[in-house]
């Protein structure tokens, strides 16, 4: 609720007390808003329905203003009544002004009609009271519709315009992902080159030892034969060779299997030992 101070005597007044004070105070030529310090002459103060809060007035410049607290339903209704005085029809303006000077004006039709009838000294069945209610109710609905439309537009603007901080965060995340990919690729290249260098320095398995191991492994089998993949694995284990030698060992086993001591079934990829 907006408060005013008399520029003549300095008395602090509620909005609905300004008219009564102006009639009593001879020095009251204008009133000033207690929050924004703007002076209002005549009936101009009626249009001043909302203002800065103390936090907004005293906070540092350059800071983002905090969102204003939402008015309660009763405060919205009081604001509607006080701001509707100037736009009231001529035959109702005097009555609306008298009601606006009161506190805690009821928001529901039955209570309002009883309140207005008692305040204005009119009968409850008087059509003037009903007209006042209909006029204030229509103004209140119109004000709520306008407020909802403004709120919806503000939300749409917020959605359509992403903040710069969000954009910068997305850019930094993409940059970080690219850096990680580059670093991982670099590590893979170094690892591959290191493995190639180690393999080039490692001596190849001895073909004679491989051939002898092949015979030993096949003799232990009931059918005296094994598939190429399994034979290579058992030969590697028997010679205690590392997995890095698997490719080279496979080539040596294939070459040795062409000898007189072995029989090769190329379709089934099976190598058997000749039995004398």
Image (spheres, grey):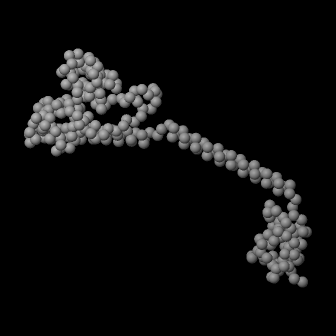
Quarter occupied by residue 271: bottom right
Question: In this orientation, does residue 80 appear?
Answer: no
Q: Considering depth in this image, is 182 or 101 the residue closer to the camera?
A: 101
State the quadrant of the C terminus.
bottom right
Percent of width and height locating residue 17: 22, 27
Q: Quadrant of residue 126?
A: top left
Residue at the location (23% across, 37% down)? 104
Relative to 166, does residue 24 appear above or below in the rendering?
above
Q: Which residue is drawn at 14% across and 30% down?
A: 94
Left or right: residue 86 compared with residue 63: left
Position of residue 217 relative to residue 97, above or below, is below
Horizontal side of residue 223 vs 8, given as left or right: right
**At 13% across and 41% down in the image, what residue appears?**
130
Q: Residue furthest right?
A: 208
Q: In the picture shown, does residue 44 fall above or below 123?
A: above
Residue 175 makes an appearance in the image: yes
Q: Which of 24 and 222 is in front in this view?
A: 24
> Which quarter of the rendering shows the N terminus?
top left
Residue extending farthest bottom: 276
Q: Nearer the viewer, residue 238 or 39?
A: 39
Judge left or right: residue 190 versus residue 273: left
Residue 25, given in percent of the width and then of the height, sits at 21, 19
- Say whether residue 34 is left or right of residue 116: right
Picture coordinates of residue 56, whole percent (x, y): 40, 29
Residue 156 rendering spot, x and y as whole percentages: 39, 42
Counting the numbered discs, the total is: 0
Q: Residue at x 44, y 39 (%)?
A: 161
């Amino acid at each position: 609720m907006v408060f005013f101070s008399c520029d003549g005597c300095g008395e602090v007044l509620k909005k609905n007390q300004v008219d009564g004070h102006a009639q009593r105070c001879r020095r009251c030529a204008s009133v000033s808003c207690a929050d924004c310090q703007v002076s209002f002459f005549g009936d101009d103060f009626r249009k001043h329905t909302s203002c800065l809060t103390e936090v907004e007035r005293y906070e540092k410049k350059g800071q983002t203003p905090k969102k204003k607290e939402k008015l309660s339903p009763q405060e919205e209704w009081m604001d509607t009544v006080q701001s509707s005085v100037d736009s009231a029809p001529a035959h109702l303006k005097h009555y609306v002004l008298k009601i606006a000077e009161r506190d805690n004006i009821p928001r529901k039709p039955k209570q309002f009609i009883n309140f207005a009838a008692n305040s204005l000294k009119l009968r409850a069945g008087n059509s003037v009271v009903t007209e006042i209610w209909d006029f204030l109710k229509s103004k209140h609905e119109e004000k709520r519709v306008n407020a909802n439309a403004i709120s919806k537009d503000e939300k749409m603007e917020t959605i359509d315009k992403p903040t710069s901080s969000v954009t910068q965060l997305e850019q930094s995340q993409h940059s970080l992902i690219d850096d990680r990919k580059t670093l991982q690729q670099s590590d893979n290249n170094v690892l591959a080159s290191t493995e190639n260098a180690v393999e080039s320095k490692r001596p190849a398995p001895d073909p004679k030892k491989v051939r002898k191991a092949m015979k030993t492994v096949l003799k232990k089998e009931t059918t005296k034969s094994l598939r190429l993949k399994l034979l290579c694995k058992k030969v590697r284990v028997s010679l205690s060779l590392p997995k890095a030698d698997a490719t080279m060992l496979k080539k040596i086993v294939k070459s040795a299997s062409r000898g007189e001591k072995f029989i090769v079934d190329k379709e089934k990829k099976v190598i058997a030992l000749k039995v004398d």
